[in-house]
Image (cartoon, coloured by chain):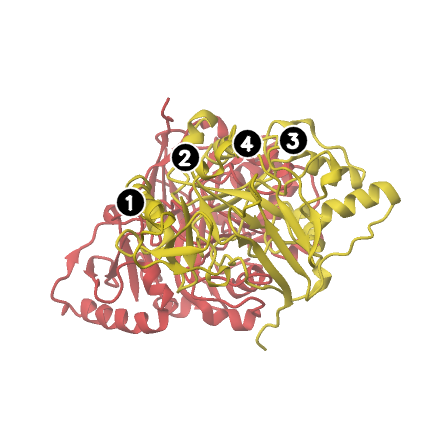
Chain colours: A red, B yellow
Amino acid sequence: MKLASLADGRDGKLVVVSRDLKQAAAVPKIAGTLQQAMDDWDEKASRLNEVYELLNRGEWPDAFGLEPEQCGAPLPRAFQWLDGSAYVNHVELVRKARGAEMPENFWTDPLMYQGVSDNLLGPCDDVHVASEDWGIDFEAEVVVLTDDVPMGVSPEQAASHIKLLTLVNDVSLRNLIPAELGKGFGFLQSKPASAFAPVVVTPDELGDAWQDNKVHLPLRVELNNELFGQPNCGVDMTFDFARLISHAAMTRHLGAGTLLGSGTISNTDRSSGSCCLAEQRMLEIIEAGEAQTPFLRFGDHVRIEMLDAKGKSVFGAIDQRICQYEADA
Amino acid sequence: MKLASLADGRDGKLVVVSRDLKQAAAVPKIAGTLQQAMDDWDEKASRLNEVYELLNRGEWPDAFGLEPEQCGAPLPRAFQWLDGSAYVNHVELVRKARGAEMPENFWTDPLMYQGVSDNLLGPCDDVHVASEDWGIDFEAEVVVLTDDVPMGVSPEQAASHIKLLTLVNDVSLRNLIPAELGKGFGFLQSKPASAFAPVVVTPDELGDAWQDNKVHLPLRVELNNELFGQPNCGVDMTFDFARLISHAAMTRHLGAGTLLGSGTISNTDRSSGSCCLAEQRMLEIIEAGEAQTPFLRFGDHVRIEMLDAKGKSVFGAIDQRICQYEADA
């Protein structure tokens, strides 16, 4: 099943989306918003799936054409957005570039932070940043959405709580990170609002590509209409999504609609490119002593998309421009 | 005006509360939840205030008695919970106890982290923690609730976005903090769900005690029915709430209903006691070389309350027991 939220008010308007992403159906009698559907998932999902089947067969009476520009983030405001860093080789690389050893327990204890979730960006929303000097970067990732997860859940138990998947651009302000992390309390100013793909899908939509609580497909990133990277999300993912959920839930219940991200996709085989500028810059620093690839400039264009084995877009594309933000005087 | 949320479903049920905290009025025709009221604050606040005036005069027809046990957190799930550390002398003390210098810019650049907000505790909810070994502590703080705050807001502009105030117990797992912060991504497992006072109030309810975007009243903490501390929230607050909002909004818009905390209240005059066990332990370490005060044990009882100049409770009390959590097998 595939779902999206039309940009409409603070919480969007839930629609069921056809497998080919072309048609949509409003479902106000089932749930007005995706959050409402997640709050009562088992019952709502089966009803939404009936609409999905009819829509795919062309038998839903009020289907309408869907354009990604109409979509907000699937959860335009969410109660929890947690982002892991599950591709540990990426973390190791970042450390190596600045000459620091990575602690051995980074291979066994996930990195994760709590991100801002009250104003999430839709797939075609501009990214507004006040200054290019902040080192604007994208991070292309996979995200899962959970139902209610009890505190203390094991990885084995956690797997069944993965209800939906999508893509995220975890926008990062690289030049603000060192000073902010140096203060010891983690990311805040250096991680502004993230942007999400237009469509969330149930794991069964991925077929054989959903294995071991990982997505075994490449994630394509284009920068200004040129391919920048396409690493495979199922390769070198040290912590799978069930493990990440268990980590997050050690001391808390996770409420329905929790978003949990994988961290930047990264393969040790560098020939597939990178899912963020920072990684490319680190490789340049290690190889040549300095970074050549600049951070994003106003007007730059980032596109993030996942194609299945047949070349069809699974979630639709995140397709954004970077723009200058000007605060009111 | 004073408001609360009865524990009822995921988002509570908004009620207007009389100034003396004894009577309440349901207001479904104005707003079903506090989040709905905050989403459209200017219009809703004036209508809610009419009910408040009638309730205080004993003229609201369907008033009913309010018990704090009926209340959930004012926002049982919130889209954003940010916690500052505005009493910098507390931070300096923590550093001193472990022999570390505090960077000079801690006096000018606020510490702040993003906390879990999808399952906030009501004032009388038990605090469930799996292990006493995690070093369970309370942190008594003041919190403001904002309406929509635009990115890049100045401290001067930010002041007008403070719509409501309340109290929080920012539960902390002290023994998990060093390893977690050592990883560099900030708090996650070491900061479980926080608990909130039953009632939120508009700043005018504080009268002269609301000055310079600070609350000039002592915050009383009782541990197992004995006074533990009563530092004054208006003293030694290095960053006022407007400054904290401006810091939070540097790279993001803040959505309506954002909760922003002051951090543990702490006065350099130690005679008023502390608002968390960690501070008391630090003072013991500095004085005697080791901590005598233990962290919380299962069965311990924490009460946090603010009284006005006449000795009346402003927000009602946070009044909780610490209990052992057992995960499902």
Identify the mark nearer the N-term, 4 or 1: 1
Residue depth check, mark 3 versus mark 4: number of the one nearer the observer = 4
On screen, residue A298 above or below B22: above
Give the side of residue B121 with respect to residue A22, left or right.
right
Q: Where in the figure is residue B68, as x and y percent of width and height?
A: 50, 59
Give the residue type that dot 3 points to: Phe
Q: Residues within 10 Å of mark 4 (few under 14, many from 20)?
A: many
In which chain is the residue bearing label 4? B
Read off the residue under disc 1. B47
Cα–Cα span, label 3 and label 2: 25 Å
Read off the residue under disc 4. B240
Read off the residue under disc 3. B106
Furthest residue to the front?
A: B58
Q: Nearer the viewer, residue B184 or B130?
A: B130
Identify the mark nearer the N-term, 1 or 3: 1
Residue depth check, mark 2 versus mark 1: number of the one nearer the observer = 1
Q: Where in the figure is residue A328, as x and y percent of width and height?
A: 36, 25
Q: Is disc 1 in the same subunit as disc 3?
A: yes
Q: Which quadrant would the N terminus of chain B be assigned to in this image?
A: top left
Q: Quadrant of residue B137?
A: bottom right
Q: Are marks 1 and 3 in contact (CB under 8 Å)?
A: no
Furthest residue to the bottom?
A: B329
Q: Nearer the viewer, residue B55 or B83?
A: B55
Cα–Cα span, label 4 and label 2: 13 Å
Q: Secondary structure at mark 1?
A: helix
Any mark on residue B161, and which? 2
Identify the mark nearer the N-term, 2 or 1: 1
Cα–Cα span, label 4 and label 1: 29 Å
Cα–Cα span, label 2 and label 1: 19 Å
